[in-house]
């Protein structure tokens, strides 16, 4: 069972969603000294006391993280950091919505 489970839907091509998952893992690696590797559409990451996956599909990114006993005290901060970072990257990568057209009334 995961200590952290987080799912975010997206409307991106699979390759772009995987790049976002990798960018998230790379940024976390710098801060938390994580090592990551891909197995198909699932990015596995780990370090002492942390083990997790980001499974990427055409419509969502699902994050599951198991924390070791000593790191469970930092669960909230770790969870907020991952969520905020992943959400920021998904918003930046989201396709621009076309501007709404005003209805023109003919007289």
Image: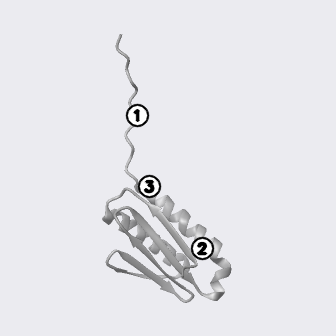
Image point 40% across, 73% down: which residue?
55
Quarter the N terminus occupies:
bottom right
Label 2 with label 3: CB-CB less than 8 Å: no
Q: Which mark's residue is nearer the viewer, 3 or 1? A: 1
Residue 94, image x, y percentages: 40, 53
The answer to whether residue 57 is left or right of residue 63 is: left
Secondary element at tag 1: loop
Quarter the C terminus occupies:
top left
Secondary element at tag 3: helix
Name above or below for residue 46 compared with residue 86.
below
The residue wearing badge 2 is 78
Label number found at residue 92: 3
Question: Badge 1: how crowded within 10 Å, few (<14), some, or many (20+)?
Answer: few
Name above or below for residue 35 compared with residue 54.
below
Secondary element at tag 2: helix
Image point 38% across, 76% down: which residue?
42
Label 3 with label 1: CB-CB less than 8 Å: no
Residue 24, image x, y percentages: 46, 70
Residue 49, image x, y percentages: 57, 87
Quadrant in the rendering for residue 20: bottom left
Residue 83, image x, y percentages: 54, 65
Q: CA distance from mark 3 to mark 1?
A: 20 Å
- Which sits earlier in the primary sequence, circle 1 or circle 2? 2
Q: CA distance from mark 1 to mark 2?
A: 38 Å
Q: CA distance from mark 2 to mark 3?
A: 21 Å
Q: Which mark's residue is nearer the viewer, 2 or 3? A: 2
- Which sits earlier in the primary sequence, circle 2 or circle 3? 2
The residue wearing badge 1 is 100
Label number found at residue 48: none
Q: Most extreme residue toward the right, as rendered? A: 73
């Amino acid at each position: 069972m995961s200590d952290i489970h987080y799912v975010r839907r997206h409307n991106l091509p699979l390759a772009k969603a995987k790049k976002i998952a990798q960018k998230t893992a790379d940024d976390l690696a710098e801060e938390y000294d994580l090592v990551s590797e891909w197995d198909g559409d699932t990015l596995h990451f780990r370090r002492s006391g942390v083990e997790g996956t980001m499974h990427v599909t055409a419509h969502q990114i699902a994050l599951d993280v198991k924390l070791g006993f000593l790191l469970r005290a930092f669960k909230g901060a770790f969870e907020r950091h991952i969520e905020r970072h992943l959400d920021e990257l998904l918003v930046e990568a989201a396709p621009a919505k076309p501007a709404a057209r005003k209805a023109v009334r003919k007289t």
